[in-house]
Amino acid sequence: MPRYRTLIPATLAIAAALFASGSAMADTLDATGHLEVTGKWTAKTRGQALTPPMGWNSWNAYRTEVDEEKVLGAAQALVDSGLAKLGYNYVNIDDGWWLKRRTSDGRMLIRTQIFPSAKLKGDSSFKPFTDRIHAMGLKAGIYSDMGRNACSQRFDLHSPNLPEGTAAEREVGLYGHVDQDIDLYFRQWGFDYIKVDACGLNYYGPDEPVVKSEGYRAFAPIIDQSAINRTDIPQVRALYQSVSDALAKSNPDNDYILSLCNWGTADVRQWGHDVGNMWRTSQDITPEWTRMLHTFDSAATRALYAHPGAWNDPDMLFVGHGDFDENHLTEARSHFSLWAIINAPLIIGYDLRKAPKSLLDIWGNADIIRLNQDKSGHQAVLEYMSDDVEIFVKTLSNGDKAVAIFNRGLAPADVALTAAHLKMTGTIALTDLWSKATQSFSGETLLKVAPRETLVFEARGARQLADGLYLSEIPGNIHVAEDGVIVPQPDPMVHRMISPWDSSRGGGSRAAYTGWGGAQADSTPYDQNLQVAGHPFATGIGILAGSRMEVKNDGFTRFETQAGVDDTTQNLKDAVIFQVYGDGRLLTETKSVYGEPAKTLNADISGVKVVELVARADNRTSDLPLIVTWGDAALKK
Ligand code: GLA
């Protein structure tokens, strides 16, 4: 693991002192072998999430007031409406199902008052419930917390469904019971999916009023949502890893999904893909337009961190409620389109027993779902951005592109969609996946996008790179094994709304999710255009030195790029060596480069399964971000 995964203030002080004294620092990151090539695809492959998970969850519909009738009603509605056939097959219970932990043996007991089929003499079991869900051809999901206590015990104090009993009995979270609970939920009760929240790691410190008023056992927080340097990243990761390991043990058939719900904290952006099948990138969504922007933005520029088996999760859908209800279908369609194109899990949060056709038509748009579920798993890349309009482009497995043009604002927008945005050339045929209208263009087409509308097209035409694919077109084939970020930093590009909880009291919600400086497709890690020694690159991968990417090669014979230190680098001292490996063998490399034109690297990758791209700082003297560009990086036939 890279150094500084946790930045305790003392570490910061040492780093500052080193800079102040001008001491030379070896590039310990490189020297300790973190950039060691592996010769293989090392991303996590466990669990069942080759495409983004789809289904239903009780939280956005009922908060803690979930019960068996409601959940089975949702399951039946998924089947009856045809949504199940379109892929919505997970039926997930969220917070509220638990009664207590039996202290004699630590076994979790279900609130059978609301889940009557779980009642057993002196005990309880969800097996009859999951049997029913399975008999409907669906899968079942459950919910827990990584700490001792759960979110409802801190935030829903008036809930009728809070755990009961002594303080020990109310410790319903996984902490200290990981193997026991996972075995119970999966092997004994038959669940297929678990969402693991993190309130117990965050909100039960000794000074929290609720700890005193409710008599909970204090847990010194290891997550601080506003301060990455006060978050114990290795420990948070290790706890979630223990769940991941327990799941593998309890599920010899590999039929499970692990959903990490620590709200974009603890730098989960960087390690979520190695531990879980999906990871929340932000705090909770609410049914408000600006809150949707907030959670969307937290995931929308993380394309290189997701791939089959591992997805960015900007939280569940709120289609059907508030700003996304039946009276706001433009907003509802936008919310759905955006989640679909960035490969977010599509988890409905609505009382489906009474869903109107207008909403069913949104969740049920088979063309939009097809984009989300495309087997190549390339999250759309942000190809144009402004505060008003964004253009996202996603490569599909048949070589076509999907494009979403999103008007974030309240005025109609005139948008020029260009062939270059799509990395296409010649005549391009567009099909509108909402209206089904078709058109074609070459060069560019002018589009009017209504306020808050998202146009989604499938685009067919000749690719700009006739004999290959740019790496920025295939993020799902890339595993960012090491992104070179030394000090995780909050991402300032995330929309900051008026807090749904605190209104405008206090100073406002400041950027809190790390990710700034992470690897980017067609942009530098700090949202600038790619440029080396004055030469701009319209396409490429922007990343920091001290990085290693694994790229799956599906039959291409050449890897080509123009690599160099990006003109936006903040580190004005150090040089970089660029190396290309094929299945662990060094194929080609540059000499140490700095401040000079990009170097051409051209490697024969015939028969190679995994290409590794390493940018190694050469005898590093400064810890400032050393920004590099793999310009025009491409796999060619
Ligand atoms: C947290 C999660 C939500 C939901 C609630 C339940 O806030 O982020 O998605 O599970 O807890 O209390």
Image (cartoon, rainbow, N blue to C red):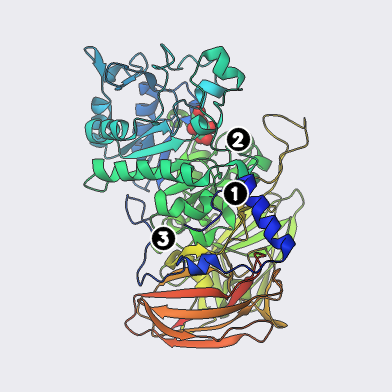
Q: Is residue 295 visible?
A: yes
Residue type beneath disc 3 = Asp
Instruction: Look at discs 2 and 3 and give the one toward the viewer.
Output: 2
Which residue is depicted at the point 42% across and 13% down?
164
Residue type beneath disc 2 = Thr
Name the image quarter holding residue 40.
Answer: bottom left
Residue type beneath disc 1 = Leu
Image side of residue 525 versus residue 398, left or right? right
* Quadrant including the C terminus: bottom left
Q: Which residue is mark 3?
A: 374
Q: Residues within 10 Å of mark 2 (few under 14, many from 20)?
A: many
Seen in the picture, residue 403 relative to 192 is either above or below; the reply is: below
Which residue is depicted at the point 63% across and 47% down?
10
Q: Which residue is mark 1?
A: 7
Which residue is depicted at the point 60% across and 75% down?
629
User: Viewer-proximal residue, 618 or 23?
Assistant: 23
Residue 417, x across and y down, in percent: 65, 69
Residue 118, x across and y down, in percent: 28, 20
Seen in the picture, residue 176 relative to 52 is either above or below; the reply is: above
Q: Earlier in the sequence, mark 1 or mark 3?
A: 1
Count of all numbered marks drawn on residues in the image: 3
Residue 71, x across and y down, in percent: 38, 28
Residues at discs 2 and 1 in contact (Cβ within 8 Å): no
Residues at discs 2 and 3 in contact (Cβ within 8 Å): no
For residue 286, which numbered disc appears in the image? 2
Between the C-alphas of marks 1 and 3, the distance is: 39 Å
For residue 118, which numbered disc appears in the image? none
Q: Residues within 10 Å of mark 3 (few under 14, many from 20)?
A: many
Instruction: Please tell me whether mark 1 sits on a helix, a strand or a loop.
Output: loop
